[in-house]
Each structure stands twice: as C-alpha cells, then as structure tokens.
Image (tube, rainbow, N blue to C red):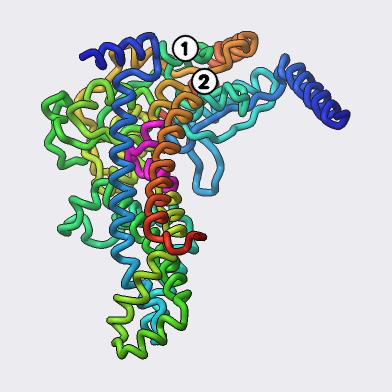
Amino acid sequence: MYRFLGITLFGAALVAGHAHARDSYDHVRFGVDVPYEPMEYRTADGELTGFDIDLGNALCEQMGITCEWIEQQWDGIIPGLMARNYDAIMSSMTINEERREQVLFSDAYLTVPSAWFAPQDSDIETPNEQTLDGLTLGVQRGTLQDSYATDFYGDVANVRRYATADDMLLDMESGRLDLVFVNYPVGKTTLLDSERGDYRVVGEMIRDPYEYFGDGIAIAFRPRDEALAERFNTALAELQESGVYDQIHDRYFSE
Amino acid sequence: MELMTWFTELLEGNLIFTPQTLSYYWDGLVTTTQLVFLSLLAGLVLAVPLAIGRSSRHRWISLPIYAYTYVFRGTPLLIQLYIIYYGVVFVDGIQESIFWPLLREAFYPALIAFTLNTAAYTTEIFRGAIKATARGEIEAARAYGMSQSLMMRRIILPSAFRRALPAYGNEVIFMLHASAIASVVTLMDLTGAARFVYARFYAPFEAFLFVAAIYLCLTFAILYFFRFLEKRLLAHLKPA
C-alpha cells in the first residue's frame, strides 16, 4: 500500500516538475516528416537538411535557444504534438481552418501552391471530373492534397493514400499511378528535376479553394504555447529584415 | 425507411462518424474480408500438397519445401509485403507483361504475400498433424494392403485435419490480424480506413477504437465457427 502511494507521489512530482520546465522554453523540439524534398530531406551522408530545417535552426539561433528535430510520419504529426512528443511542428504545414481548431499557428513563412504531376506521355491536359474518371491518383495521407483530391475526385477516381511522400514517388516511377497531387516545390524537386525527369505539370498551380489551401505554411504549436509562438513570430520578422530569410529561401528555391 | 431516419438521427452532430466515413469503414471491411478469405483459401489449397511433400522420406522433396517454410516463417510479413509490392517493379519487363494490370493494383501483391505466408504456416501445422498420426493406424492400413496414396487419403489426412483444427483456427485469427498491415501499400482495408479517419480528423481514439471493435467482432465470429467445427469433428475426443 505504502509502496503504491510512493510510486503515485513520485509520478505526480515528476509530472509537476515536467510542467514547470515547459513554461519557459530554452530548448524546442520540432516534429518533422522526412523526406519531403526540398522542404525537409536527408543528404546522401544522412544529414537532415531542407528549407524548413535551415529556417528552423536559424530561428532558434536568432532566439538564442537550442532546437532538435524529431521525425514523425505525417498522418500522426498533430496527435504527436498534443502528446508532447515535440513542442512544435515545422514540416511544411499549411494553415487551414480544420487544423486551426487543433493547433496554434505562427505567422506564415512561405506560400506554396499545389500541382498535379503526370508522366510526360500522359494525355491529360486539364484535371477535372471527366479527365480524371477512372484514373489512379496518388496523395500523401492526411495532407490537404488528400482532402482536396478525396472531396473533389474521390467519387470518380481511385485515390491512393501513401504514408510517406517517397513511397508515393516510388509508385509513380513504377507506373502504378496516373497522377500525383503534391505541393509544387516537392513535385518539382522529386519529379521534374529527378534523374528520370520525364514528368510534367498538368494544368495550373492550385491555390484555391481557401478552405483547403489556406494561408500558407507556418509553424504549429500547442494552443496554450502562445508566448512561444509570439517569440517565433518576432524572430521570423527579424530574419526577414536582416536578409537571412532570403538567403535560405534562395538556397532551395532558385529558379 | 424507418431504419434510415434512425440512422441519420444517431449520427447527427457527430463530426467523425458521418455516413461518408462509415462507408470508408464498410469498404475497408469488405477489402479485409476478401483479402483474408482469399489468401486463406489459396494458402490452404497450397498447404495440403506441401505438407504431404514436407513429410516425405525423400529429402529432395522435403528439403525445398522446408526451405520455403523456413524463409516465410522466419521473416516478418511486412517485409515480405514490401518486397513483393515494391520489389516486383524492378523485374525487367514486368510493366509490359500480361501480369502488370494485376500487379499494378495494391490488392494482388498483398494477396500473393499473404497467401505465401499463410501457406508456409499452414504447411507446418499440417505436417505436425501428419507426423502425429498413431503408428497403429498406419500399420492397420498397411495390413489391409492399402497403397501409400490410398492410406494418405483415407487414414492419415482425415485424422490429421482434425488434429490440426485448433492450431489452424489460430492461424486464421492471426491472418486476420496480420492483414492490418495491408494499408502500408495503400490498400483501404479496415486499418487503412481507420488511418484515413485518424489523419483527417486527428482523432486516434475514435478511429482506432472503432476499428478494434470491428476486428473483435470478426475474431469472435471466427472463434465460434472453429468451436462449432471442433464440436462436430472432434466429438470423439470429448470425455464421455
């Protein structure tokens, strides 16, 4: 009985101590879904890199704190934040209403459109309900592209949902998919600029409707961490002022 | 139509379990059932001759079968599924072959992986049951002048199947649970539907508890089916 009580008290003390340490962050853990080239990926020697990574590290440096990156598959990335596996999500997450109900977003640090990609010899010109009828579309599960493709074409086309972006690209290469729907920089790096390279963009860049494509990409925090989000917003503004942001941007999005 | 209104009222105000997500779960149930049933059926058909071969005295028959069951029981099903699904595309000329329309889908590679896996386990279950045949029965069959094949058909296999029944019932349940990995190759099985709902509504508990309840129901159905079979077929083993 006493032993049980002791364990309970010890546990309670642990939880209390933990909560206290969380009030002022001098170390931030970012959740990130890798690979999503060029936003976040590993170089040949295994080093984590990408636009999000470099910007995140620069932000932490600006704030005078340390940070750490924790890999998390996309479909569990918001639950992982709530479960305190990390303190923030910096993984090309687009701000939209559905997510705003769950998490607190920083200011947007980038806006990217989405686009349809198909093999060069595909005969589709404009994606719509008629042209996509009966085709196989690839999306990453739980992304806004998944929601969009499911809601608009889920009834006519066969939507296949992948846990990771590279599984999807592998199936695109092997000819299992007629089209994939991803955010444009990722599609450009991994399909258009890939070694095989015989892919093209189908139709126009897609930025609406607003309820899916929202306000751009931002860092997501737990709703109670308003102070932390505010500190990141200040640091982001400073980096944009000082030109560091542009340097990082040009490193990954030079046209 | 009474049922329909009751159903809509039940779902009213529920953000996660809408008719749409329930239809995902339903499609998932159909896919899981098809996948498990077909792979078990094909696995069973494969396993019977393999088990006979595996208990053969000739090493050139039994050794290759042993190698097969060893490999498929010795590696995780998930790895086998990955190799068959993602590996098959690296075979030269596969995209132009007549098999590609089947292999292009996620269903058939998964079916192949599951069939080969369950066939390996079932082979070993049956082999054990064949080996455990009472010597007296075999000697009696020989004394009647039965040929090897007639003895197999009339004496050994019928009693071996009965002995294998409880173990095979477990294999069926394991197969149902193992089928949950089908969603990693984009199949929308029950787990795939749960993952979809989870990712879309950020609701792990609702999505996975609901699907766990469905798996439980399926498991109970299988359990009762095998209990019924055992009652009928193993009646002679019950204490009087």
Q: Position of residue B147 (x, y in %)?
A: 29, 87
Q: Which label belongs to residue B195? A: none
Q: Position of residue B130 (x, y in %)?
A: 42, 74
For badge 1, the amino acid type reads Arg
Quadrant location, the N terminus of chain B: top left
Q: Is residue A159 magenta?
A: no
Residue under the image location 33 percent in, 21 percent down: A113
- The residue that mark 1 highlights is A100
In depth, the one of A32 and B213 nearer the eye is B213
Kindly tell me whether residue A242 is visible in this rendering: no
| SS class, disc 1 | helix
Q: What is the number of callouts on the image? A: 2
* Contact check, label 1 and label 2, Cβ < 8 Å: no
Between circles 1 and 2, the one closer to the viewer is 1
In depth, the one of A242 and A236 nearer the eye is A236
Look at the picture and state if A42 lies above or below B54: above
Q: Position of residue A98 (x, y in %)?
A: 42, 14
| SS class, disc 2 | helix
For badge 2, the amino acid type reads Tyr
Task: Tell which subunit mark 1 falls on.
Answer: A
Q: Residue furthest front?
A: B240
Q: Which residues are magenta?
A: B177-195
- The residue that mark 2 highlights is A245
